[in-house]
Amino acid sequence: MQQFSEHQIDGVIVVAATGAVDMLTAPQLQDVVSAALERKPGALIIDLTEVDFLGSAGMQVLMITRKELDGAIRFAVVADGPATSRPLKITGVADYIDLFSTLDVALQNLKA
């Protein structure tokens, strides 16, 4: 099964992850995100809805992406539930990244 996929919705690139995002798979996520950003999208959303484990390496990818963009491209993360939003909140990552419970809500906020 494909771990990471990418699609566009109204000029927003959505990178969706599935399964575990850990030290083995985080480099793949970084590669997909970097490739997406080379196309200079209007905004980027990383969708973790289908992720059942988010490790520190995965969170590091989110922080690196946030730092690289530095406000130049709008950035959001979709994470809801104990496997994703909880570790992001506990570690403080959620204080630096716009976190949304669903893709629809994230899209609405990025367009506003």
Image (cartoon, rainbow, N blue to C red):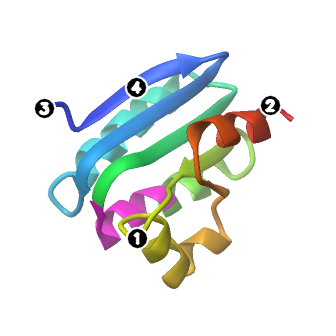
Q: From the viewer's perspective, is 64 left or right of 24? A: right
What is the spatial separation of the Cα atoms under label 4 and label 3, in whole angstroms?
14 Å
What is the spatial separation of the Cα atoms under label 2 and label 4, in whole angstroms?
19 Å
Quadrant, the N terminus? top left
Q: Which residues are magenta?
A: 53-62
- Asked if residue 72 lies in the magenta stretch, the reply is no
Q: Point out which mark residue 111 bears.
A: 2
Q: Magenta span: helix, strand or loop, mainly? A: helix
What is the spatial separation of the Cα atoms under label 4 and label 1, in whole angstroms?
24 Å
What is the spatial separation of the Cα atoms under label 1 and label 3, in whole angstroms?
23 Å
Amino acid at circle 1: Pro
Dot 3 and dot 2 residues touching (CB under 8 Å) = no
Q: Quadrant of residue 110?
A: top right
Q: Where does label 1 land, which residue?
A: 82
Helix, strand or loop status at disc 3: loop
Amino acid at circle 2: Lys
Quadrant, the C terminus? top right
Q: Nearer the viewer, mark 4 or mark 3?
A: 3
Can residue 91 be seen here? no
Residue neighbourhood size for the residue with mark 2, other residues' Cα within 10 Å, grouped as few (<14), some (14–19), many (≥20): few
Q: Position of residue 37 (x, y in %)?
A: 52, 31
Q: Nearer the viewer, mark 1 or mark 3?
A: 1
What is the spatial separation of the Cα atoms under label 2 and label 1, in whole angstroms?
27 Å
Dot 2 and dot 1 residues touching (CB under 8 Å) = no
Is residue 100 depicted above or below 12 in this figure?
Answer: below
Specify which label sits upstream in the sequence, 2 or 1: 1
Q: Where does label 4 land, which residue?
A: 6
